[in-house]
């Protein structure tokens, strides 16, 4: 069977401490309730510098400079300066961007002139843009900028402020005077998601030598929603991202399913390519402002830095089989059905063991499982535990129950077939897809044959259903053999029909004689 392939991937992080303070949901709700809250007063003392963010080992895993299993060799806590790794902001799979550069990118992707930057900031940032390997090619035009008095005036008219080192350097205007769906805060959230997704797509192209003009379709799968009062969440992020990334020949649409959306989107992309509808489909998502500092109160209580200070983004290109890139096994798809139920055992069974059973595989036939890959240093202080490890233990326990492995093998299975969590808690970002890039590298090096990517989502958050959600798929090292499709031309079909008719005529004449 001929399968679609993962032709390349790109992963980006954006360090946004000021957007965290002004826009993250924990901070905005706390400020609305009590502007003098101790948490807000102490926040600055627990924010990291860009250098600290770059040296943080899980971030280096995310952008592809080190493999996930290497985290087990690094002393904890990873956020302690003595445990930082010596790597660069640019990775093999992507990059970590500072906030100042990102403000310029937000301005660039804004096509309605809603983002205003100060003239002083523009003069300072333009030389940095000229040195960036991707931004310098995007021909970013920031204009002359605004005076401080003009920015202050816009803030009085409900604009959302943009700060850098506690200094006002710009703002985002509301797009409508009364439509809550177009207020300044929502516009900021949507522009941030758009800009970070564009950055991920550009990194996908840059790191993998991909011509974005060859992209036929883009599926966007973040957790944001753009629209106005008459069609809230109508979209389309995908075409907006494709336009700014330079995918001139692409169409696109949005996929939504909370944290599970990326897995759904990649399965959809694989189906489109396998069906022959499109040759090259990009799946992309940008970051979520709301989740910045989401667990900040718990981090500060534990005398930790606030670790949720980075936006996440990713882009994956799904293409026709090239005989080289990892294939997506479209015959091994896990589905959480309506009747499955929401118990952990039922969910894991539907996403892991059921599709394996259908293909005569057991759980040990999958070399690595990529589940909800949240960084445990973020989640454990908030009481959520080590999410990836919990998933691996559940998979292993099912394996014991099924007879795929012995009870004494359980923890060895967790270690061998799992990996430490390394992704930012950006909702949709950790859900399986961060391992696609590392898995491709490991397959190319002969370190891995099969990996299962598992996306899970909590649909009850939308208050429309108590249903859980999930989908999984397997990526596999390419065998190097491309399927050959035997095609028949219209002329050959006509000749075959004519030949058959002549044979029928000859047979009839023979019977008559």
Image (cartoon, rainbow, N blue to C red):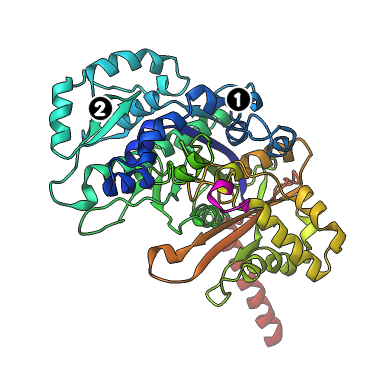
Q: The N terminus is located in which quarter?
A: bottom right
Give the image location of residue 232, x and y in percent: 27, 57
* Image quarter of the C terminus: bottom right
Indicate which disc residue 81 carries: 1
| Left or right: where 208 falls relative to 460 | right
Disc 2: which residue: 170
Is tag 1's residue or tag 2's residue first in the polypeptide sequence?
1
Nearer to me, 21 or 132: 21
Residue nearest the viewer, comparing 194 with 319: 194
Percent position of residue 170, x then y:
25, 27
Q: Is residue 63 left or right of residue 361?
A: left
Q: Secondary structure at mark 1?
A: helix
Residue 491 is inside the magenta segment: no
**x and y, in percent, of residue 294 in the image:** 44, 46
* Magenta-drawn segment: 380-387
- In this rendering, the answer to whether 332 lies above or below 193 is below
| Front-lying residue, 118 or 235 | 118
Query: Residue drawn at (66%, 56%), measured in percent from left and top?
Result: 390
**Relative horizontal placement of residue 138, taking residue 468 as reference (left or right):** left
As drawn, 114 above or below 421:
above
């Amino acid at each position: 069977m001929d399968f679609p392939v993962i032709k390349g991937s790109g992963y980006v992080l954006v360090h946004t401490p000021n957007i965290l303070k002004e826009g993250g949901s924990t901070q905005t709700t706390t400020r609305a309730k009590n502007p003098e809250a101790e948490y807000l007063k102490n926040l600055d003392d627990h924010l990291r510098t860009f250098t600290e963010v770059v040296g943080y080992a899980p971030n280096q895993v995310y952008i592809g400079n080190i493999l996930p299993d290497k985290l087990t060799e690094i002393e904890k806590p990873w956020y302690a300066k003595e445990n930082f790794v010596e790597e660069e902001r640019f990775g093999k799979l992507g990059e970590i961007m500072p906030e100042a550069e990102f403000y310029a990118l937000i301005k660039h992707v804004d096509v309605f002139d809603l983002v205003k930057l100060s003239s002083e900031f523009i003069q300072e940032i333009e030389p940095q843009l000229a040195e960036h390997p991707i931004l310098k090619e995007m021909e970013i035009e920031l204009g002359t900028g605004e005076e401080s008095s003009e920015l202050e005036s816009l803030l009085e008219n409900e604009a959302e402020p943009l700060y850098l080192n506690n200094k006002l350097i710009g703002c985002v205007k509301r797009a409508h005077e009364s439509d809550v769906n177009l207020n300044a805060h929502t516009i900021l959230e949507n522009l941030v998601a758009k800009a970070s997704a564009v950055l991920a797509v550009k990194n996908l192209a840059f790191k993998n030598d991909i011509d974005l003009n060859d992209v036929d379709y883009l599926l966007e799968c973040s957790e944001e929603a753009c629209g106005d009062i008459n069609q809230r969440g109508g979209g389309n992020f995908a075409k907006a991202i494709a336009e700014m990334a330079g995918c001139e020949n692409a169409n696109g649409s949005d996929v939504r399913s909370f944290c599970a959306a990326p897995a759904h989107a990649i399965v959809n992309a694989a189906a489109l390519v396998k069906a022959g509808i499109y040759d090259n489909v990009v799946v992309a998502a940008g970051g979520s402002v709301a989740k910045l500092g989401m667990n900040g109160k718990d981090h500060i209580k534990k005398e930790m830095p606030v670790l949720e200070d980075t936006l996440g983004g990713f882009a994956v290109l799904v293409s026709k089989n090239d005989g080289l890139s990892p294939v997506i096994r479209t015959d091994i798809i896990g589905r959480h059905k309506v009747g499955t139920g929401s118990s952990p055992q039922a969910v894991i069974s539907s996403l892991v063991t059921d599709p394996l059973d259908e293909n005569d595989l057991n759980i040990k036939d999958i070399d690595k499982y990529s589940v909800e890959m949240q960084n445990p240093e973020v989640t454990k202080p908030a009481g959520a535990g080590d999410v990836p490890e919990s998933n691996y233990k559940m998979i292993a326990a099912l394996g014991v129950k099924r007879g795929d492995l012995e009870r004494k093998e359980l923890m060895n299975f967790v270690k061998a077939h799992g990996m430490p969590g390394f992704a930012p808690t950006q909702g949709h970002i950790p859900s399986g897809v961060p391992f696609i890039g590392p898995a491709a590298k490991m397959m190319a090096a002969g370190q891995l044959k099969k990996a299962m990517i598992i996306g899970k989502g909590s649909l009850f958050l939308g208050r429309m259903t108590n249903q859980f959600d999930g989908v999984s798929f397997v990526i596999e090292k390419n065998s190097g053999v491309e399927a050959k499709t035997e095609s028949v031309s219209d002329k050959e079909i006509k000749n075959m029909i004519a030949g058959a008719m002549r044979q029928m005529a000859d047979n009839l004449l023979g019977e008559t004689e």
